[in-house]
Amino acid sequence: MDRRKARNMQEEIYVGSRNQAKLKAVELAIQELKQKGVDMPTFQVIGVDVPSGVAAQPYSDEETISGALNRCLELKKNYPASLCIGLEGGVQRNHEGLFVCNWGVLLDEHGKKYVASGARVKLPEEVAEGLDNGKELSEMMELYSKRKDIRSKEGAIGILTEGLLDRSTMFAQVTLLLFGQKLHAQDGAYSVAKM
Ligand SMILES: O=P(O)(O)OP(=O)(O)OP(=O)(O)OC[C@H]1O[C@@H](n2cnc3c(O)ncnc32)[C@H](O)[C@@H]1O
Ligand SMILES: [Mg+2]
C-alpha cells in the first residue's frame, strides 16, 4: 500500500460483537491513532455477532484468549481481506483473588495475528463467590451495583473504579496495543507521522 495515500482510503474493520462498549472502544482507539498522527485509512467499524466458541463466562486467561481468537476466525471466514478484531472478557484467579481479565486479538488483512490484554482489577469476595457458584460476572455485578446492563456500559472495571477506567476505555487500550504491535511489526501498511 502506498503510505502517502492511506488516509484517503476507506476500509471496514470488523469487530466480533454488537456490544456497544466494545464497538465504542474500537472507535475511541481509531480516534486516538488519528490524533497521534498514524497515517491509516478511514475505518468504518462494523460489529457482527459471532460465537466465541468458549463458555459464556470464561474462567482463565487461556479460555478468554481463545474466545477473542475464535471471534476473529469466524469474522475472517466472511471478511478475509479485512482487519478483524475479537474482544473477550473473563476472569482469572491468582494468589490475590479472582480478577477480571480482558483480551483482544487482531487478525490483519494478511492474516497476521496480534494479541493483547487489558487492565485487571480484583473482584469483591461476594462477586467472586457467585462466579465460583456458576453465575456470570455481568449478573453478579448487576446485583453488586444495583445497576442494569453494565456489560454494555461502564463494565465491572468501571463500577469497581468509580468510573475512573470504564470498559470502553479499557478495551480501547487493548485495541491500541493491537494496532501498536502491528505498527511495530513494520509491515508497511501504515506509518506514524510524528512520534
Ligand atoms: O456480546 P458480547 O460481545 O458477548 O459481550 P459480553 O458483554 O457478553 O462480554 P464477553 O462475552 O466478552 O464477556 C464474557 C462474560 O464475562 C462477563 N464480563 C466480562 N467483562 C465484564 C465487565 O467488564 N462487566 C460485566 N461483565 C463482564 C460477562 O458476564 C460475559 O458474559
Ligand atoms: Mg458474551
Image (cartoon, rainbow, N blue to C red):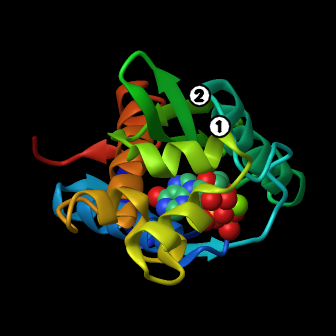
Q: Looking at the image, do the residues carrying marks 2 and 1 touch, with CB atoms under 8 Å apart? A: yes
Q: Secondary structure at mark 1?
A: helix
The reply, left or right, for residue 39 in relation to residue 2 is left
The reply, left or right, for residue 99 in relation to residue 78 is left
Tell me the residue that label 2 is attached to.
61
The reply, left or right, for residue 65 in relation to residue 66 is left
**Pick the front one: 100 or 176:** 100
Q: Quadrant of ligand 1?
A: bottom right
State which quadrant residue 67 falls in. top right
Question: What residue appears at the point 40 percent right and 31 percent down from the top-left corner?
Answer: 181
Q: Is mark 1 within 8 Å of ligand 1?
A: yes
Residue 97 at x, y percent in the picture: 42, 28
Residue 173 at x, y percent in the picture: 33, 49
Marking on residue 131: none
Q: Is residue 14 visible?
A: no
Marking on residue 64: 1
Q: Is mark 2 within 8 Å of ligand 1?
A: no
Q: Secondary structure at mark 2?
A: helix
Mark 2 is surrounded, within 10 Å at the Cα level, by few (under 14), some (14 to 19) or many (20 or more) other residues, namely some
Residue 53 at x, y percent in the picture: 86, 45
State which quadrant residue 163 falls in. bottom left
Looking at numbered disc 2 in the image, what kind of residue is underneath it?
Asp
Query: Marks 2 and 1, Cα distance to the nearest angstrom?
Result: 5 Å
Q: Is residue 52 visible?
A: yes
Q: Is residue 136 above or below residue 17?
A: above
**Pick the front one: 147 or 11:** 147
Q: Residue furthest left?
A: 195
The quadrant of the image that shows the C terminus is top left
